[in-house]
Amino acid sequence: MKIYVINGANLNLLGKREPEVYGYDTLDGINDEIRDKAADLGLECEFFQHNCEGEIIDRLHEAALNADGVILNAGAYTHYSYAIRDAISSIKIPVVETHLSNVHAREEFRARSVIAPVCEGVIAGFGKHGYLLALTALSEIAGTIDKTER
Ligand code: DQA
């Protein structure tokens, strides 16, 4: 099974960006840990980060053709991108919304996710471990979900 790991706006700055909130690990370092865990689970991962909404949408469309599931940290787009929401509801593979920080314990605008209702599930607040939890969840459920039933 193949899983796409998609990170959105500003996540290329991990390690330097507000480390007290997002931690000191770089995105490359986190992706290495995800790759190792994926190997343990017998999964293959492809990694992608972009700051632009359209590029994230294109990658979700591509995931529908090439992957069995998606781990998506859309960054701030989570809170207002109806275009990313529509892209998720247009594809038939499970998408797990993932955040490093606990978005419910921060500013009010972060508590609202416009993509959560069309995602399979949401993981937030466990730092980089959230990506590994999402991977474990997808290893259990990807391939078993019929999104047409929702
Ligand atoms: C984030 C939370 C978002 O509110 C924020 O805009 C980010 C990162 C997280 O991983 O905690 O860029 O998605």
Image (cartoon, rainbow, N blue to C red):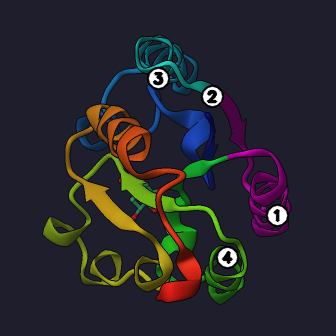
Kindly report the distance in space between the C-alpha atoms of the residues bearing marks 2 and 1: 16 Å
Q: Is disc 2 surrounded by few (<14), some (14 to 19) or many (20+) residues within 10 Å?
A: many
Q: Is residue 82 above or below residue 122?
A: below
Q: Which residues are magenta?
A: 45-67
Kindly report the distance in space between the C-alpha atoms of the residues bearing marks 2 and 4: 21 Å
Q: Main secondary structure of the magenta part?
A: helix
Q: Is residue 96 above or below residue 130?
A: below
Q: Secondary structure at mark 3?
A: helix
Residue 84 bears which disc, if any? 4
Q: Secondary structure at mark 2?
A: strand
Q: In the rendering, at what x and y percent does residue 137 appear?
A: 33, 45
Q: Is residue 72 above or below residue 122?
A: above
Where is ligand 1, by quadrant?
bottom left
Q: Closer to the N terminus: mark 1 or mark 3?
A: 3
Residue 34 bears which disc, if any? 3
Q: In the rendering, at what x and y percent does residue 17 appear?
A: 45, 38
Is residue 112 toward the left or the right of residue 108 in the image?
Answer: right
Q: Closer to the N terminus: mark 2 or mark 4?
A: 2
Which residue in the structure is indicated by mark 1?
61
| Residue that appears at 28% across and 55% down | 123
Q: Is disc 1 surrounded by few (<14), some (14 to 19) or many (20+) residues within 10 Å?
A: some
Identified by mark 2, the residue type is: Cys
79 is within the stretch colored magenta? no
Q: Is disc 4 surrounded by few (<14), some (14 to 19) or many (20+) residues within 10 Å?
A: many
Q: Are marks 2 and 3 in contact (CB under 8 Å)?
A: yes
Kindly report the distance in space between the C-alpha atoms of the residues bearing marks 4 and 3: 23 Å
Quick one: 120 or 104, which is closer to the camera? 120
Which residue in the structure is indicated by mark 2?
45
Identified by mark 1, the residue type is: His
50 is within the stretch colored magenta? yes
